[in-house]
């Protein structure tokens, strides 16, 4: 919690440039990615959000997977270049160099046209009452559009992101179907998400 005048607010989430975040909690990210990647099935339309954990998910997808993948993150698309069974589309827009994702009206419009079977959602902050949050208003719009059209939304958040918030609200907990986190998340921290009906997977 953050102490403020008259009470307390949730802890702030952790953000920073993509290149720095790649080096942070790498073991936890890889374990989360391995468990999350197992959710992907042949024949699905899969949207992969930007982020360093979603990049690890892309790398963890089984080589035999046959699916359609759309992403707003160029590094994710490059990572999947050798997957012969995947049809990979990079969603266009303005590139946010710090986070290596595309944003803007073009990106939002393209994402809204997709009815995905599965979305792998990068999470900056995840709080029981606030929901999914992020640090950038333009990224918020793209993430929200991904969630709107998805049958399943798999949120990826290591233990440090649970109970935290960022300035811009992406979605409520009710819009998340799965949460994949690492073994460092204790049962007390996970209880609110389980109570919200989210399927929680610990890596």
Image (cartoon, rainbow, N blue to C red):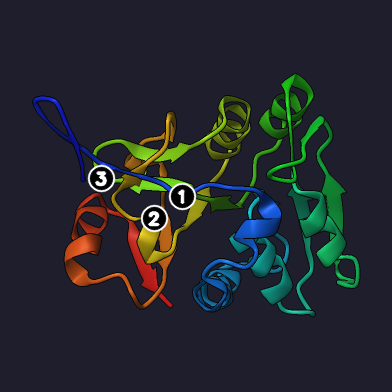
Residue 31 picture location, percent across and down: 52, 78
Q: Residues within 10 Å of mark 2 (few under 14, many from 20)?
A: many
Residue 128 badge: 3
Residue 151 picture location, percent across and down: 53, 47
Residue 76 picture location, percent across and down: 77, 58
Please tell me which residue is depicted at 87% across the width and 60% down the height of the picture. Answer: 78
CA distance separating discs 1 and 2? 7 Å
CA distance separating discs 3 and 2? 11 Å
Residue 14 badge: 1
Say left or right for 47 vs 84.
left
Residue 100, relative to residue 149: is it above or below?
below
Residue 46 visible somewhere in the drawing: no
Q: Residues within 10 Å of mark 3 (few under 14, many from 20)?
A: many
Q: Nearer the viewer, mark 3 or mark 1?
A: 1
Residue at the spot of label 2: 161
The answer to which quarter of the image holds residue 143 is top right
Residue 16 visible somewhere in the drawing: yes
- If you read the primary sequence from the N terminus, does the residue marked by circle 3 or circle 2 appear first? 3
Please tell me which residue is depicted at 59% across the width and 27% down the height of the picture. Answer: 141
Q: Are marks 3 and 1 in contact (CB under 8 Å)?
A: no
Residue 61, relative to residue 171: is it above or below?
below
The answer to which quarter of the image holds residue 95 is top right
Tell me the element at label 1. loop
Tell me the element at label 3. loop
Using the image as rendered, state which of residue 130 and residue 118 is in the foreground: 130
Figure quadrant of the C terminus: bottom left
Q: Nearer the viewer, mark 3 or mark 2?
A: 2
Figure quadrant of the N terminus: top left
- If you read the primary sequence from the N terminus, does the residue marked by circle 3 or circle 1 appear first? 1
Q: Are marks 1 and 2 in contact (CB under 8 Å)?
A: yes
Residue 87, relative to residue 50: is it above or below?
below
């Amino acid at each position: 919690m953050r102490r403020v005048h008259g009470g307390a607010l949730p802890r702030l989430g952790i953000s920073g440039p993509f290149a720095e975040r790649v080096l942070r909690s790498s073991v936890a990210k890889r374990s989360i990615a391995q468990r999350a990647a197992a959710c992907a099935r042949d024949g699905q339309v899969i949207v992969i959000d930007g982020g360093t954990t979603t990049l690890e998910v892309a790398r963890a997808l089984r080589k035999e997977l046959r699916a359609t993948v759309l992403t707003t993150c160029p590094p994710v698309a490059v990572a999947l270049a050798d997957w012969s069974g995947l049809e990979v589309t990079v969603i266009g827009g303005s590139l946010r160099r710090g986070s290596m994702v595309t944003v803007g009206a073009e990106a939002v419009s393209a994402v809204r046209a997709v009815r995905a079977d599965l979305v792998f959602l990068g999470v900056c902050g995840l709080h029981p009452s606030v929901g999914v949050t992020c640090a950038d208003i333009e990224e918020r719009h793209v993430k929200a559009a991904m969630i709107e059209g998805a049958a399943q939304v798999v949120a990826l958040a290591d233990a440090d992101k649970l109970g935290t918030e960022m300035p811009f609200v992406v979605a409520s907990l009710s819009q998340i179907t799965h949460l994949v986190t690492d073994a460092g998340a204790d049962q007390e921290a996970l209880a609110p998400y389980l109570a919200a009906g989210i399927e929680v997977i610990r890596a």
